[in-house]
């Protein structure tokens, strides 16, 4: 009797835990959506409006928001101050708790999910008279953060990370002086879980786990397993688990491997960022992209969180170095994003930046402290210091392309033996790229039904006309595709939704 009972309960426990682990890989996107955008340093009220006015209508699936909890106020307000927590009060330069809750509600109402960049590897680094964005004070030098509260016993002993071949050092010592929390302590876990479960209850769909590489996977597992289910009052199915994507920088050659984290959730694939940048900068030929994926050393597609650049490596922090493409190389950047979005690999994130000249520079402000709102131009682009890559037609129309071709395969790969490539996504979409210094002008198989299609890169369909290039697809599916070397964009894309 007792033996049978134990057998039954062990079995149930195993089923339960494997269900949870699988669920953490699901972004919980609204049906038909595929791609999130990182609105780096945007204010909550502006994100709420952007969900309603632009992201929802254009088919974006979600927004990664900057850290939501109180951070240190640093001189000249650099962007990185938000990665120096001082408490878990939900007040930052992006807004307060009520504004955050309102944003999550409004975005969920239009089918756009919210993902929070959460920082719980560490607290703020040492500084005199530390003060936070919610008015809290702290003494990081003595590891005293009374607004949580944390005291010195909640942290690892002080040491510095200077050897990335030593996993103990990477996980137990201080990353650039940031006071390193000990997540094996129940007090610390409970404070982190109070914070993250509060966000889940407010309706967020998941988390980017900052600096996950610097936290022991076993501690992360314990924390993740205690997450609440997503809030059904925000449209999530009962039993939905928070999506987890973990920042693990692994370009190879270090003690800590990205594969140590793939059982826990999705993992940032920095090799994708470095490799796609190298290809479209001309360091590798486009024809090699035919086996884009694990053959390039990437994680399996369902584990790989992919991006062209992120808020760190676009300014030389983190991994990828000079290979990383940013808005500053607009033509190649748009081509790299178009390829990421056209090719069925990974879970993609579009970056949306503010313009910067130096690597510490924070977001645009009205007065040196308060973040300024973006200004929107008639052509959808932004000004006022905001780049808004997500509002570039070449990028948002490719998000639409990815939505339309989801669950199809790559067919009819063509290349010219160097830097001109094209492929179909079954019978739903066709895309071509020209990164050679001569024209592409040839007949290609588009796999699409006969008709006239609008190129969604040079323009789009507007009523019964194309605002940019158009192409006639013959009854055999072939079309004469042209991308001249001196065009503004090196991409041509059509899909079943861009047919006249
Ligand atoms: C493309 O090639 C055809 C001949 O095959 C030519 O008639 C046409 O002018 C070319 N177009 C461009 C844009 O070079
Ligand atoms: C492609 O161009 C060739 C040569 O100009 C032409 O004969 C053919 O009809 C064109 N195909 C389509 C589908 O327009
Ligand atoms: C093999 C192949 O298709 N090569 C092509 C490379 O690109 C030029 C210009 O588009 C074509 O003329 C070649 O036929």
Image: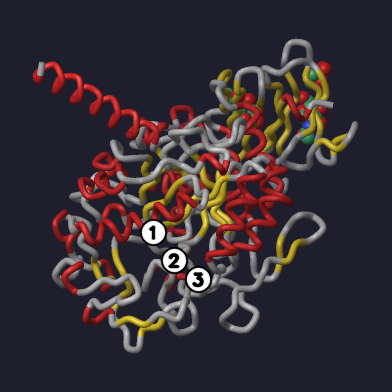
- Position of 484 with respect to 198 (left or right) is right
User: Mark 1 to mark 3: distance in Å?
Assistant: 15 Å
Element on which disc 2 rests: loop
Image x and y of residue 353, in percent: 57, 61
Category of crowding for the residue at label 1, using alpha-carbon neighbours closer than 10 angstroms: few (below 14), some (14–19), many (at least 20)? some
Q: Does the CB distance between marks 2 and 1 fall below 8 Å?
A: yes
Residue topped by disc 1? 195
User: Mark 2 to mark 3: distance in Å?
Assistant: 6 Å
Q: Inspect this view and state whether residue 155 appears.
A: yes
Q: Does the CB distance between marks 1 and 3 fall below 8 Å?
A: no
Please give the name of the residue rendered at 81% of the width and 23% of the height, measured from the top-left corner: 472
Please give the name of the residue rendered at 64% of the width and 73% of the height, measured from the top-left corner: 372
Element on which disc 3 rests: loop
Answer above or below: position of 330 versus 464.
below
Q: Inspect this view and state whether residue 445 appears.
A: no
Please give the label number shown on residue 214.
Answer: none
Q: Quadrant of the C terminus?
A: top right
Which quadrant contains ligand 2?
Answer: top right
Residue topped by disc 2? 69
Q: Nearer the viewer, mark 1 or mark 3?
A: 1
User: How many numbered callouts?
Assistant: 3
Image x and y of residue 87, in percent: 37, 71
- Position of 48 with respect to 307 (left or right) is right
Please give the label number shown on residue 92.
Answer: 3
């Amino acid at each position: 009797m007792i033996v049978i009972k134990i057998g039954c309960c062990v079995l149930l426990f195993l089923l339960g835990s494997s269900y949870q682990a699988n669920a953490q890989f699901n972004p919980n996107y609204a049906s038909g959506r595929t791609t999130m955008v990182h609105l780096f340093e945007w204010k909550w009220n502006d994100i709420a409006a952007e969900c309603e006015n632009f992201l929802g209508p254009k088919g974006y699936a979600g927004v990664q928001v900057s850290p939501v909890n109180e951070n240190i106020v640093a001189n000249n307000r650099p962007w990185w101050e938000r990665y120096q927590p001082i408490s878990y009060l939900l007040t930052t330069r992006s807004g307060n708790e009520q504004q955050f809750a309102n944003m999550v509600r409004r975005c969920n109402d239009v089918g756009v999910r919210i993902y929070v960049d959460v920082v719980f590897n560490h607290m703020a680094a040492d500084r005199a008279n530390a003060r936070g964005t919610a008015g809290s004070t702290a003494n990081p030098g003595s590891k005293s953060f009374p607004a949580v509260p944390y005291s010195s016993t909640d942290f690892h002993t002080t040491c510095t990370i200077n050897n990335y071949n030593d996993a103990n050092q990477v996980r137990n010592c201080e990353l650039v002086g940031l006071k390193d929390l000990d997540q094996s302590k129940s007090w610390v876990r409970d404070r982190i879980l109070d914070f993250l479960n509060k966000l889940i209850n407010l309706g967020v769909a998941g988390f980017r786990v900052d600096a996950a590489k610097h936290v022991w996977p076993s501690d992360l597992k314990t924390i993740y397993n205690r997450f609440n289910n997503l809030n059904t009052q925000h449209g999530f199915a009962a039993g939905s688990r928070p999506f987890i994507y973990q920042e693990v920088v692994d370009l190879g050659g270090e003690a800590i491997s990205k594969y140590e984290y793939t059982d826990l959730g999705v993992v940032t694939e920095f090799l994708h960022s470095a490799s796609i940048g190298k290809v479209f900068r001309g360091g590798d030929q486009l024809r090699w992209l035919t086996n884009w994926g694990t053959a390039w050393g990437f994680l399996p597609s369902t584990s790989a969180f992919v991006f062209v650049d992120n808020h760190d490596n676009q300014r030389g922090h983190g991994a990828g170095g000079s290979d990383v493409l940013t808005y500053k190389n607009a033509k190649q950047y748009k081509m790299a994003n178009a390829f990421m979005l056209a090719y069925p690999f990974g879970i993609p994130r579009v970056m949306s930046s503010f313009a910067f000249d130096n690597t510490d520079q924070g977001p645009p402000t009205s007065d040196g402290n308060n973040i300024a709102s973006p200004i929107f131009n008639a052509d959808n682009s932004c000004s006022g210091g905001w780049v808004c890559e997500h509002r570039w037609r070449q990028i948002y129309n490719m998000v639409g392309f990815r939505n339309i071709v989801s669950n199809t395969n790559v067919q009819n790969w063509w290349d010219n033996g160097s830097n001109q490539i094209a492929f179909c996504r079954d019978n739903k979409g066709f895309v071509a790229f020209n990164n050679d210094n001569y024209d592409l002008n040839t007949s290609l198989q588009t796999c699409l039904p006969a008709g006239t299609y609008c190129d969604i890169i040079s323009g789009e369909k507007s009523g019964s006309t194309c605002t940019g290039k158009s192409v006639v697809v013959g009854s055999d599916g072939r079309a004469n595709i042209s991308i001249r070397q001196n065009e503004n964009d090196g991409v041509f894309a059509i899909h079943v939704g861009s047919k006249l």
